[in-house]
Amino acid sequence: MLNIILMGPPGAGKGTQATSIVDSFHLPHISTGDMFREAIAQGTPVGLKAKEIIARGDLVPDEVTCALVKERLAKEDCANGYLLDGFPRTIPQAEALDKLGPEIGREVSLVIDLSVPEEELVARISGRRVCPKCGASYHIKNMKPQVEGICDRCGAELIQRKDDNAESFQVRLQNYYSSTQPLVDYYKKQGKYHCFDGMVGRANLEKQINALLEENK
Ligand code: AMP
């Protein structure tokens, strides 16, 4: 069963690889970042709580995030696999998922981590444009859409994320190092961890990840 976690620092290419994985393996794409942005757009209580936190690059509290994921993972479309993108981001979140997964028969099977040096992350984030509708990512220089400003995948108008500025990016990166990176050892101990070099190029990376998923599906 492909019950996958996709992790990596901001700008590592999670969104891009997630899009390709869910399209190839027909999995629901569960991006907590997308869920929060949606909640903000709709002005829900979760959105109101998360808005300022996300804008400055901090992490939304574990209770709020875990409750959201718990509800989402229980849905029927996750019965035959799922891709978690951007969750867990802290050890308590991983522990909550380890408790929940087996309870609902949806235990994590694989963790994919994308490794990219810091200088490259800065360049990627500053030129990033995203689709607010389907979550696809582009870059103004390195990964242009076919029609400028328009998503190739769903035709929506691309935007620059509010937290893709230098200041918020630094906060996100520091949060990544302090709260998320400890998950590497956590999942290594469970034998689920697979690290990929995020600098090999999009298509190459897709091929390598596909090979791992084909072996494990
Ligand atoms: P992302 O789209 O994955 O880069 O997430 C955007 C923002 O949403 C993050 O910078 C956090 O503020 C928040 N967020 C997303 N996922 C989580 C999570 N698992 N835990 C806490 N905050 C999160």
Image (cartoon, helix red, strand yellow):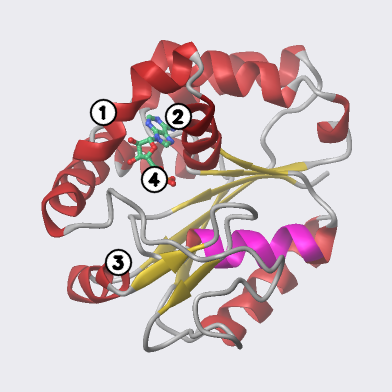
Q: x, y (%) of residue 33?
A: 47, 40
The reply, left or right, for residue 115 in relation to residue 110 is left
Ligand 1 quarter of the rendering = top left
Q: Is residue 157 placed above or below 33 in the rendered structure?
A: below
Q: Amino acid at mark 1?
A: Ile
- Please say whether residue 59 is visible from this viewpoint: no
Residue wearing tag 4:
184
Q: Which labelled disc corresponds to residue 125?
A: 3
> Is label 3 in contact with label 4 (beta carbons under 8 Å)?
no
Residue wearing tag 1:
53
Looking at the image, is mark 2 or mark 4 nearer the viewer?
A: 2
Mark 1 and mark 3: span between their CA atoms? 18 Å
Mark 3 and mark 4: span between their CA atoms? 23 Å
- The magenta region covers 15-23
> Is label 2 in contact with label 3 (beta carbons under 8 Å)?
no
Q: Amino acid at mark 3?
A: Ile
Q: Is mark 1 within 8 Å of ligand 1?
A: yes
Name the element at disc 2.
helix
- Quarter of image, res 186: top left
Looking at the image, is mark 3 or mark 4 nearer the viewer?
A: 3
